[in-house]
Image: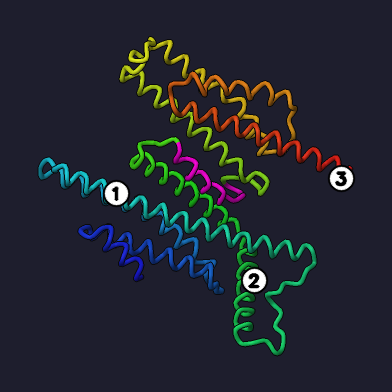
Amino acid sequence: VGSGIYIAAEFFPADIPLQIVTLVACVCTCIILLFFQQPSSTSPRWIPFLYALVMSLLPIGLLIHAVEQGGASRWGTPSVDEVAAMKETQTSFIGLFACICVLLSFAIKLKLSAIARQHAQKRRGQPSRAGTVRYGYSSARQRKTTSNTSSAKWNRQVAGMGGEWMPVMGNVSVFVAMGLSLVLNLRLTEGSNTSIFALAPILLLLNEDILLLKGLGDKQRYFPLAVTVAVYLAMNSSIHLMEMVRQGQNQVLGFTHWTFTLKNTAAIVFTFPSHYLFSAFLWDGLRRSDMSLLCATPLNVPPLFLADVSGARWLAGVAIIEAVVQYFVSRHIHIAGLKRV
């Protein structure tokens, strides 16, 4: 409650509706985290409803801000400072919910890992250490054991309820956090190419579920990261290319519209084979022939020197690094397989 009051008063000092939304979102998030850390017999029933409430507060807060912004414009044209203050308020609200979603997805990832570890111990026939209490241990040790026992009961109860809602909640949190982070990136850095390398690791918190990501296991956990980086750089390069053509920068460089567009479009397309090979390798882990890498990797050299769009050069550089990593990892897997044979 204290953290919610502080955040509401610090970021939205003159906006009471957003203060209420922020306070409720922070309190519900703290309760969800408390249920994860100190589980009880009824906490699995309340977590989905609290999570739905937190997620519903995001569009409600944005709608309230839009109504307030529209109401302010009715009374006259707002000044530059007022427009900047409204935009800053909206950016702060989006950043707050991005942090909340990352926090929830991380907590869900830890809880799912604990449940999976407990199931693995049962399959191996190992006794769970959560239920053993030995005579002569200190009271702190006994309290820790009791906490572990309640956590194990909580995990069994979640598994008995099906447990499908936890991975779905985690994946929704990751997608919302990634989307909000991209919005903040567009507002604060105007779509920087390098920012995706800091935002893409959020996708490592994704889980396999029955609704959104059915085939995403631990072996494919780097696949969404690589695909997101490639897609973001390709889209960003295409957008910047159209902006450069619209502003007439091709004439400054001495190219016509068609020549400039075809040259940079070809530079972007030349990087696709390497990204495809690396993404397929991350998905199935199968070793490709060296000839495919040998044919695809040199295609990334011309974009490094001929592309006028910085995103295309980043795309080519990342593709070359991915090709080198794929070659050495595949070679290591091949040698390890030969040693076992």
* Secondary structure at numbered mark 1: helix
Which residue appears farthest toward the bottom when viewing the image?
Answer: 136
* Residue found 41% across the figure and 65% down from its top: 28
Above or below, comparing residue 334 to residue 43 in the picture: above
Which residue appears farthest toward the left when viewing the image?
Answer: 76
Circle 2 residue:
152
Looking at the rendered structure, which numbered label has been put on residue 90? 1
User: Could you tell me residue 129's position as x and y percent?
Assistant: 71, 74
* Residue found 43% across the figure and 63% down from its top: 29
Looking at the rendered structure, which numbered label has been put on residue 340? 3
- Kindly identify the amino acid type of the residue bearing the numbered disc 3: Arg
Residue in front for this viewpoint, 337 or 317 = 317
- Indicate left or right for 6 with 239 as reference: left
Range shown magenta: 194-211
Above or below, comparing residue 80 to residue 149 in the picture: above
Give whichever of discs 2 and 1 has the lower sequence position: 1
Q: Within the image, what quadrant is residue 73 found in?
A: top left
* Residue found 64% across the figure and 23% down from its top: 296
- Kindly identify the amino acid type of the residue bearing the numbered disc 2: Ala
- Indicate left or right for 186 with 76 as reference: right
Name the front one of labels 2 and 1: 1
Magenta stretch: includes residue 253? no
- Indicate left or right for 336 with 213 as reference: right
User: Could you tell me residue 158's position as x and y percent?
Assistant: 60, 64
Magenta stretch: includes residue 206? yes
Above or below, comparing residue 98 to residue 30 in the picture: above
User: Could you tell me residue 200's position as x and y percent?
Assistant: 51, 43
